[in-house]
Image (spheres, rainbow, N blue to C red):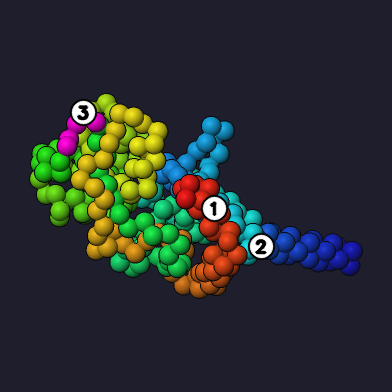
Amino acid sequence: MNITKKILSTLLLTGSLAISSTASAADTLTFGTEATYAPFEFLNDKNEIVGFDVDIMHKICDEIKVTCNIVNQSFDGLIPSLKSRRIDAAIAGIDVTPERKKQVAFTQVYFDDSSVQFIVLKDGLTDLEQLMGKKVGYQNGTPYQKFLVERFPDATPVSYDSYQYAFLDLKAKRIDAIIASSLVTAQWLNTNSDVDTVGGKITDHEFFGEGLAIAVRQGNDKLLTQFNQALDKLKANGEFEAIYKKWFNK
């Protein structure tokens, strides 16, 4: 009888631990990002992931009363990580495009980031017509490769896991230009006196999507609703605007 009681006690204890563990897991959300995309997400001098998206993420987690856990990984691995349940959401300057909508669900657009620019060295290209036969860097997982192939078929696209490596190659003159969001190129221009843009801003919703949104797994309607409600509240109470001014000085 005592043995039976011990077994039952052990089972009850194990069950309660399992329930506790599940509840704890439910109170933590893991966000994936790619921290080389300043000012949206990047590593500061303390090796901490910071930026506009990171502040938005923490505010959303505060609103829905969960703990945020953020992991840094390659941009082109974010959607596969979502689909395989290694992360719960992805926030990384992700444009909403028709191709991505087929794989994941998106929140409302929280940032209109629909223009791109080509960035070059100041002693380099002076006109987009000069891209013929030139190497242009872009980040894996972005729609920029397709744009380059269709709009600049005579250029040579060069893929990178991270923009920081593309930027190093541009500085070393191993590539001739980089295509990136105009907000990101503005950050580079502010901190590097030897680079410039060429050709002006380009807006093309066919390639660059509807704006930035947070990605979650398809079918996770509860989380999607929570995120959208939190974004609505942040925009209504002025906290979203404060974060925007902090990172974009407007």
**Where residue 234 sits: x, y (%)?**
57, 63
Magenta: predominant secondary structure element? Answer: loop
| Amino acid residing under circle 1 | Ile
Query: Who's the residue at 89% across and 64% down the image?
Result: 2
Q: Is residue 235 magenta?
A: no
The residue to which callout 1 is attached is 243
The residue to which callout 2 is attached is 65
Is label 1 in a helix, a strand or a loop?
helix
Going by the picture, which residue comes out furthest to the top? 172
Q: Earlier in the sequence, mark 3 or mark 2?
A: 2
Going by the picture, which residue comes out furthest to the right? 2
Of circles 3 and 2, the one toward us is 3
Is label 2 in a helix, a strand or a loop?
loop
Judge the density around disc 1: few (<14), some (14-19), many (≥20) Cα neighbours within 10 Å.
Answer: some
**Where residue 118 sits: x, y (%)?**
25, 43
Judge the density around disc 2: few (<14), some (14-19), many (≥20) Cα neighbours within 10 Å.
Answer: few
Q: Nearer the viewer, residue 7 or 234?
A: 234
Look at the picture and state if 221 lies above or below 118.
below
Q: Earlier in the sequence, mark 1 or mark 3?
A: 3
**Where residue 141 sits: x, y (%)?**
32, 51
Query: Who's the residue at 24% across and 53% down the image?
Result: 202
Q: Quadrant of residue 24?
A: bottom right
Q: Nearer the viewer, residue 22 or 136?
A: 136
Mark identifier at residue 224: none
Look at the picture and state if 161 lies above or below 19.
above
Judge the density around disc 3: few (<14), some (14-19), many (≥20) Cα neighbours within 10 Å.
Answer: few
Mark 3–mark 2 Cα distance, whole angstroms, equals 51 Å
Instruction: Give, as a single range, the part of the protein colored magenta.
Output: 122-126
Is label 3 in a helix, a strand or a loop?
loop
Mark 1–mark 2 Cα distance, whole angstroms, equals 19 Å
Q: Is residue 5 left or right of residue 127?
A: right
